Amino acid sequence: MTATRRITKAVIPAAGLGTRFLPATKAVPKEMLPVVDRPAIQYVVEESIAAGFSEILMVTGRNKSALEDHFDRSYELENVLREKGDDVKLSRMESSAASADIHYLRQGDPRGLGHAVLRAASYVGDVPFGVLLGDDLIGAGDDLLGRMAAVRARVGGSVLALMEVPAEQISRYGCAAVEPTSEPGVVRVTDLVEKPAPGEAPSNYAVLGRYVLDPGIFGVLRTTEPGRGGEIQLTDALREMCGGEASGPVHAVVFSGRRYDTGNPGDYLRAVVELAWDRADLGPAFREWLGGFVAANAHRPPAGAGSRAA
Ligand code: UTP
């Protein structure tokens, strides 16, 4: 089966509790933590729009109203800056995300990623759609979603994104068993395991926070029982679809670009450093400082408070 319809709808689940980033996320959603000078969620929304997935439903929860405020106009701030003639700062408030058609839905109980996606069923209807996790950043310019949509257009079903990770890290992720296809960089997914125990992973391929899903996923999610952690897992529903009978098949694009899970403090730090390094405006001074800092501190043991484990 092929499906040539252009994908325009995206669901951004952003209702998770963010417990790995406490206490920062006690009152601030993890998606609002700044990566250089904009919140993580803004990169995700901009990526979605750049791929043509511009009708966005954000699934949020309690304490997440800052997400809605961020994508709303701030007339008061704009007027103050306009009166001051501060066009530079005014232009920073403009982004492609400002023109997005963003809808919001509360998840209610955060009963897992699968449950958050299921809440989007009536918004999505009977068309294929994208899912972008609100705390997962992909290097700009990689057009991962575009490649995934192209695979869906050729072979139908659902398309995941996989990234090879070191064996000792695979138990942090959903993990895919795969077989090759005739297309380089595209694999068929034959099985999925959410956070496999060490030694039980079928591969080193980790599932990233980007999905192109067949709307048949909703029927499967409706009957998916709570799995790992008592949550309704998207991975469990996709696993059922791998067999090919229930709205399959499931393929995946193997991604080798940059990816950061900003809900994880260590990855968040890498995202800030690498994105600042690349910036045309801030980059030159930052690179010079960082080079000097590393050279001067390479052999210095970490100071007391700063050495607390992440
Ligand atoms: P995570 O695995 O990062 O879980 O969710 P979490 O609860 O957000 O964070 P920790 O583990 O407590 O630190 C993966 C994605 O699924 C969304 C999250 O917002 C994130 O984008 N999610 C998760 C929901 O939208 N609802 C849920 O019930 C659970």
Image (cartoon, rainbow, N blue to C red):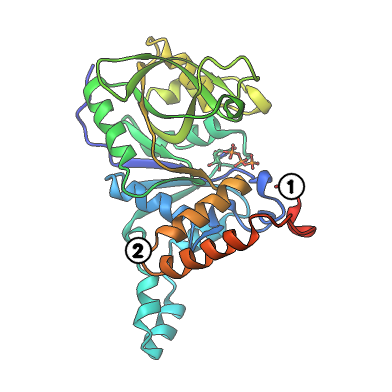
What amino acid is labelled 2 in the image?
Ser
Residue lying at the far bottom of the rendered structure = 84
Q: Residue placed at 46% from the left, 70% from the top?
A: 285
86 over 121 or under it: above or below: below
Picture quadrant of residue 170 = top right
**Residue 309 image label:** 1
| Residue 171 horizontal/vertical position (percent) | 61, 26
- Classify residue 233 as left or right of residue 74: right
- Classify residue 210 as left or right of residue 108: left
Q: Which residue is mark 2?
A: 95
Judging depth in this view, the residue of 139 and 111 nearest the camera is: 139
Q: Judging from the image, what secondary structure is the residue with disc 2 in?
A: loop
- Classify residue 35 as left or right of residue 23: left
What amino acid is labelled 1 in the image?
Ala
Q: Residue placed at 63% from the left, 29% from the top?
A: 231
Picture quadrant of residue 20 = top right
Regarding residue 37, the answer to whether it shows in the image is: no
| Residue 24 horizontal/vertical position (percent) | 67, 56
Q: Residue placed at 49% from the left, 62% from the top?
A: 36
37 over 186 or under it: above or below: below
Judging depth in this view, the residue of 306 and 177 nearest the camera is: 306
